[in-house]
Image: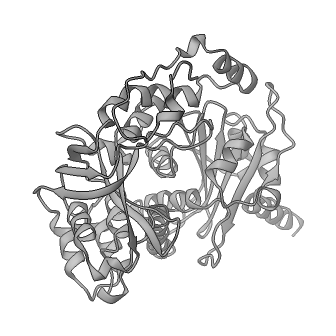
Amino acid sequence: MVSTMTGMLGHLGTPGVRHDPIVSTPERLCPMCKRVQRLSGEERCAIHVKAATLAAHHKEFDTKQISGSSPPGVFVGRFGYPKVYVGPMVPPVSGDTEILDTPEWWMGKGFDEIVDFRYSLLRGYSRANVFDAHKGGRLIETLQEVAMMTKPVDTELVLTRPPRKILDLREDSQPFGPIAPLDSFQAGNSSVDDRIEKAFYDGDLVADDAVLQLYRDGILVTRIQRAFSLGMFGENKRRKLVPTRWSITAVDSNLSLRLMARVRQHPLIDKYRVYKYTYLDNTYVGILTPESWRFEWIEAWFEPELLATSFPDVNIATDVENSNYVSPDGHRPVMLGDSEGFRDRKTYAKPGGCYYSARLAVSEYLDATRRQAGAIMLREIHPGYIMPVGVWNVRESLRALFKTKYEQFDTMDAAMNYLSTIFEIPKRGWIENSALLQKAYFQRKINEFN
C-alpha cells in the first residue's frame, strides 16, 4: 500500500517542481496489504503495484514538455460525446517503445510489467468533435498520420500544466498513465503502413470492408482498432471519431461476424473437444461441440467487486447470477454470460467487450482450421486477478488456448466430467448458468426418450 507519500494527493497535478518524495511502503510491511491478502486470498495488492509503479515514473513526468517515441499510441475518450477528449500517448523515452501499446505482445507478462507499460505513457488531451475525423484539423490529422506508422515515431508534447499523476485507491480499477491538457503536439517522420494508408485514402470503401481487408493482410487487431477510433475508414463524409473503448468492441464484433459467416459453411467437427489455459489467475476452458455454429461466453468472478468495475454498464441486480458454490476460502462466485444461436445476435451482449473478444478468437480459430462447431467458452476469475487489465486479455488468452493440445470425447457428459477436473466450480454450477449446456442436456433426454 502507500505510506509516506508526503503531500502526494495535495500536490498531484499542480504546477511547479515537487520537492517532496513519493515513497511506496514495501508490500511485505504494509498492514493494509497484509489485511487485503488475508481476507481476499490475493497474493498481491493492486494498489501497491500501481503505487510502486507511479513512484518509479513520477519524476519523468514532472514537466510541461515531454519528448519521446510514441509506440505509436492514441486515445479517444467517451465522456461528453459527441465532444470528446482525444490525444497522443507518449512515453518520456526514445527508441523502440512499440510494446508499450501492443497488447498482442503482453501475453505471459505479469501485473507489474503490464502496469508499467500503462504508466509509462502520458496521455495529452484536447477537446474535439467526433465529426472532426473528416473535417480535419491539425491535431486530428497528425494523430491519423501517427496511427498509420509502422514503427515508433519521435514526438514532442507541450502541455498547459505538468501531468496529473493519479493514484486510484480502488483495487479494482484499471491502470492508466498520467494525463494533462495538450497545448501543442508534433510528430516526426517514420515509415507508413501502405495497407492502412490505402484504406485511409479510399473514401468509397465501407469501414467494415476496410477492417476485414486489413485483418486478412495480417495487421494486428490493436492497430486496426487504433485507426478505427480516429475515424480513418469508411466513406469520407460518414467518418467519425470513435471512443477507444467502443472501437475495440466494434472491431472485434465486426471481424467475428465476417468470420462466423465463413465458419457456417465449413464441415462440423466429429467429437467434443475441451481446451484449457491459465493466465493471471484466470482459468479458461473452451468446449467445442459437433454441431452447427452457436456461441456462449460465461465468466465466474470470485470477487464480485472486480466484476462491477470491469463492467460499469452491467446491471448487477438483473444481469448477474449468484452461484451456489462456495470456495474453501469462503468466496461465492457470481456469473455473467450470454449466448447466441446459429444466426447473428441482435442485441448487445451482457458481458460487453469480453464477449466479442472471445467470439473473435473462437471464430478465427474455426475458420483457420476450416471447421464448424458450437463453442461454449468459460472463464473462472480467481482472487489472484488483482485488477482488470482490458479485454485484450480475453482475446489473447483464448488465442493461446487454441494453440494448446485439446482433449477429445465422444459425449458431452465425458467432456463435462473432464471440465470438473480443471475448474473449481463443479459442472452443475456451469450447467445451471449456461443456456447452451442446458439445451445440450435437454436434447439428450429427448433423444433418449425417442
Pinpoint residue 9: horizontal percent, then vertical percent. Answer: 53, 33
At horizontal 58% and vertical 23% (from top left) the residue drawn is 1
- Residue at 77% x, 60% y is 319
Say whether residue 433 is left or right of residue 362.
right
Q: Quadrant of residue 212?
A: bottom left
Which of the 4 quarters of the picture holds residue 136?
A: bottom left
Residue 335 appears in the picture as rendered:
yes
Residue found at the far front of this picture: 16
Residue 443 rendering spot, x and y as whole percentages: 80, 66
Figure check: 258 above or below 68: below
Quadrant location of the C terminus? bottom right
| Image mark count | 0
Residue in the foreground of this view, choosing between 90 and 195? 90
**Left or right of 60: which side holds 277?**
right
**Above-or-below relation of 404 to 314:** above
Q: Is residue 83 above or below residue 75?
A: below
Front-lying residue, 380 or 387: 387
> Within the image, what quadrant is residue 192 found in?
bottom left
Q: Is residue 434 left or right of residue 194?
A: right
**Colour approach in the figure:** one colour
Is residue 135 or residue 408 the one in the foreground?
Answer: 135
Q: Residue furthest right?
A: 449
Q: At x 37% / y 31%, what residue is drawn?
A: 58
Residue 375 location in percent, x, y? Answer: 60, 59
Q: Is residue 108 visible?
A: no
